[in-house]
Image (cartoon, rainbow, N blue to C red):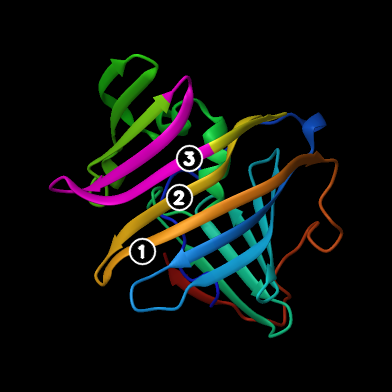
Amino acid sequence: MVMNRFLIVLLLAATMQTSAQQGYLRVSFIRSLYAPASPPEIVEGNIYYSQKGAVHIEVTSPVNQLITLTGKEMRLYYPKERKAFVFESANPMSLPFASAFLASTRESFGLPEIGFTVLSVVRAGDSVISSWGPPPAGRQQVEKVVMTEVNGDVVKTESYAPKNKLSTRTTYKNFVSIQQGRVPLEIYGGWQTPKGWTRENLMFSDPTTIAALPTHLNGFTIPPDVTPRRTQW
């Protein structure tokens, strides 16, 4: 599976609020993954975000793949192979990379909206470093999230597993202003695995607002004659 592991960052639940007049946010992406003892993995495609909160991802290279994200469920479909997968996650911190781009438009990355509370805030010049504690449901996986803002832009996030063990680190660069807010066009992240540190680079381009989804994505569902494989994320 081309996209079998995503950047563990933040907040599909904390995506943007848009009005009906704003249609869909569309952005192109190139994702480069560097995992220990594995060849680099390069994926290209487009992300579409609707005002209702759904995220659609169309992978165009190296294979054709359609992904739909709603709530805590992620559906993947390979049109050529006619294979499908459904991932369910009870952990709000284990999320696809699209949310790293979308959540950047939310104040405090939307952490308060999913139950995180402020532990501490340190101000130094133009920088603000805040620590956040997770809601009870997430405390087995996440001890805290540390977020660094410069002039209102979130430029770095780190999440820590219990016993203060660093589990993810992400930096955000090259911010631009669009209709939905300010977004980073470069995201560099990584997470800890049993085999070592995995790195992920995300490059975004051409963020635009469109009136409607492309026809092949509008109302897309996994075909009824294809039985998806279901698994927990």
| 11 magenta-colored | no
Circle 3 residue: 172
In depth, the one of 184 and 231 nearer the eye is 184
Amino acid type of the residue that numbered disc 1 sits on in the rendered structure? Thr
Amino acid type of the residue that numbered disc 3 sits on in the rendered structure? Tyr
Q: For the point 49% across and 25% down, which residue is it?
A: 107
Question: Residue 57 falls in which quadrant of the image?
Answer: bottom right
The reply to whether residue 24 is visible in this rendering is no
Left or right for 16, reference 201: right
Amino acid type of the residue that numbered disc 2 sits on in the rendered structure? Tyr
Asked if the residues shown at circle 2 and circle 1 are in contact, with their CB atoms under 8 angstroms apart, the answer is no
Instruction: Indicate the position of residue 150 as horizontal and vertical percent values.
Output: 43, 24
Left or right for 38, reference 18: left
| 168 magenta-colored | yes
Q: Residues within 10 Å of mark 3 (few under 14, many from 20)?
A: many
Instruction: Indicate the position of residue 136 as horizontal and vertical percent values.
Output: 26, 40
State which tag comes first along the sequence, 2 or 1.
2
In the structure shown, which secondary structural element does the residue marked by tag 1 occupy?
A: strand
Q: Which mark is residue 188?
A: 2
Instruction: Locate the C terminus by quadrant.
Output: bottom left
Q: Residues within 10 Å of mark 2 (few under 14, many from 20)?
A: some
**Disc 3 to disc 1, C-alpha distance:** 17 Å
Left or right for 207, reference 116: right
